[in-house]
Image (cartoon, rainbow, N blue to C red):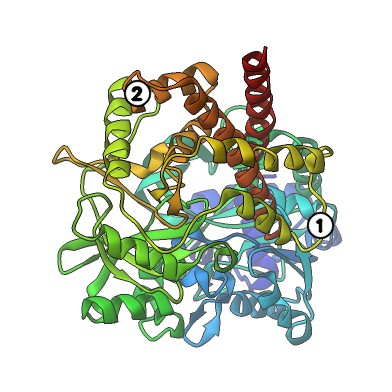
Amino acid sequence: MNKTNLDLLKLIKQQDIQNQRELAELSGYSLGLVNRELKRLRELELVDAKFNLTSKAKALFKKNKPKNAVILAAGFGMRMVPINTETPKGLLEVKKEPLIERLIKQLQAVGITDITVVVGFMKEQYEYLMDDYQVKLAVNRDYATKNNFYSLQRVAGILGNTYIVPCDLWCKESPFDTDELYSWYLLGQEEVEQSFFRVNKKQEIITSDKRGKGNRPYGICYLTEKDAKAVAKQLNAAAAEERHEKSFWEVTLEDENRKYTVYPKLMDDATVFEINTYEQLRELDKSSSHLETDALQQISKALGVTLDEIVNIEVLKKGMTNRSFLFTCKGQKYIMRIPGEGTDHLINRKEESDVYRVLEGKQICDDVVYMNPDNGYKITAYLEGARSCDSTNKKDLQRCMAKLREFHQSKLKVKHTFDPFKQIEFYQSLWNGQSSYYKDHAEIQKKILGLKSFVEKYKAEPVLSHIDSVYDNFLFTKEGDIRLIDWEYSGMQDPHIDIAMFCIYAGYDRKQADALIDLYFEGKCEKMTRLKVYAYMAISGMLWSNWCEYKRTLGVDFGEYSLMQYRYAKDFYRIVQEELAKEEK
């Protein structure tokens, strides 16, 4: 059997068909094709001469009848900034109705009452659905670091005659039905530019690594029992493979020739809308209550513009501490920073605001247009054409170290201090009694805290230091200047800690660290000062390792970065001890 005769069989069941011409009109297939496929259905003993279903056909419908649905709602919805700081994507309202509620109602309207919602980000906000719609919730604890491959794998055991539905769709007409005869994946009817999907003449879905002219994918899928078992097997088998951490679950539908193993279901693009961005929501429903977010209200007030004048909103790469997005107002581009999870415990925004006041007008940092010392929201002018430092390029490193040295030599001062030893213990206190993931953590932290007497002995005059002076935070402007951004952790401290911070973020080994130290000190670094920078690398490694462990309690896992910082604590502590032992001989 094929898609065409199965489509015709479904129409015969659901419509009062009198003749082939009527069937052709309803299906959109040519009369010749209908005649040929109808003959095939009769040969298979599925339809009689009077367009009645046989018992064999009824058994086929029963076998493939939809039983349940899975709604995927675990992700951040990063492109929905700034809305996603307040509301998970599935609960965005269109025409005064949350997206996920509309989908649930459409499923229930065709008899699907067994509905599981896979949640993660802001999972508590979905809890009411259990009472109001009798759905079940499943939690994807890896939502912050892994893609929806793992959301579906979380419920792989319940797949079978199942609708799989993303939570970010608004469907004017329901894509669900009381009857299904084959597995399908929903695509738009019209061909669009910049698509990875194409439906060929054989009614096959072809995927590509390159964007081109094709059909818009909407993510809804129906899997019959047979295909669902194959997908579940792949999900479970591949879940442990690191290569799938960023995968969408749809990779399980592809064969070795990049064809989907399910048929396409084509829907009028004017009846289904995928909402990935603030502006897509605004385009669909200008009166949506979620358009008036706190972040946009602050932009409106700070820049003296209306909400409609805030356009071209585009998410930037998610930082380790914050979320940021680019936007345009009256032809000028800006960046809005929104504090990330747990930063109210990590950052003193009033102190950060004091730092920016000290830096104002000195051409050291980016141009701050607005800073809210209460909640940490910040607006800066976008540096068009700027690029980050290349940590492998010696010329870049020379210029960055010259800029850092110049900044330190200006001896700027603020009232607060960044004490790495106190912060190490403070970050650990935020774990709420949880143990470290590292077996020897207590022993290593005790050793690191013991370095305090050594660095104090050789400490340079405290000045305003950046503390988070990683290569990503050195921006080379198109005018030839360098700006140092992200001053959240800055405070009074030995400026040489900034060299150590650069090294451990760049992943430098001892030889590379020595080369950077020589650039900063212009080849004139005393031995004990060099050892002190090593010590700061160990101290900073423990600092950020504890920071990562706190963020992990919030569901944010930094993976290899966290492990790397812990190794710096251990390895450079050992190097310092070995070098000091040589000095004593």
- Up the image or down, 585 lies above or below 128; here it is above
The three-letter code of the residue at mark 1 reads Gln
Badge 2, how many Cα within 10 Å: few under 14, some, many 20+? many
Which comes before the other along the chain, label 2 or label 1?
Answer: 1
Q: Position of residue 80 (x, y in %)?
A: 46, 65
Identify the residue at image location x=40%, y=28%.
Answer: 391
Which residue occupies the foreground of this view, 56 or 230?
230
Which residue occupies the foreground of this view, 226 or 304?
304
Give the Cα distance between marks 2 and 1: 41 Å
Which residue occupies the foreground of this view, 318 or 83?
318
Identify the residue at image location x=61%, y=42%.
Answer: 247
Q: Position of residue 108 (x, y in %)?
A: 71, 78
Image quadrant of residue 106? bottom right
Compared across the picture, whether 78 is left or right of 105 comes to left
Name the quarter where the N terminus is drawn: top right
Q: Secondary structure at mark 1?
A: loop
Name the quarter where the C terminus is drawn: top right
Image quadrant of residue 555? bottom right
Label 2 sits on residue: 519
Label 1 sits on residue: 434
Q: Nearer the viewer, mark 2 or mark 1?
A: 2
Mark seen at residue 287: none
Q: Position of residue 508 (x, y in %)?
A: 51, 25
- Up the image or down, 219 lies above or below 407; here it is below
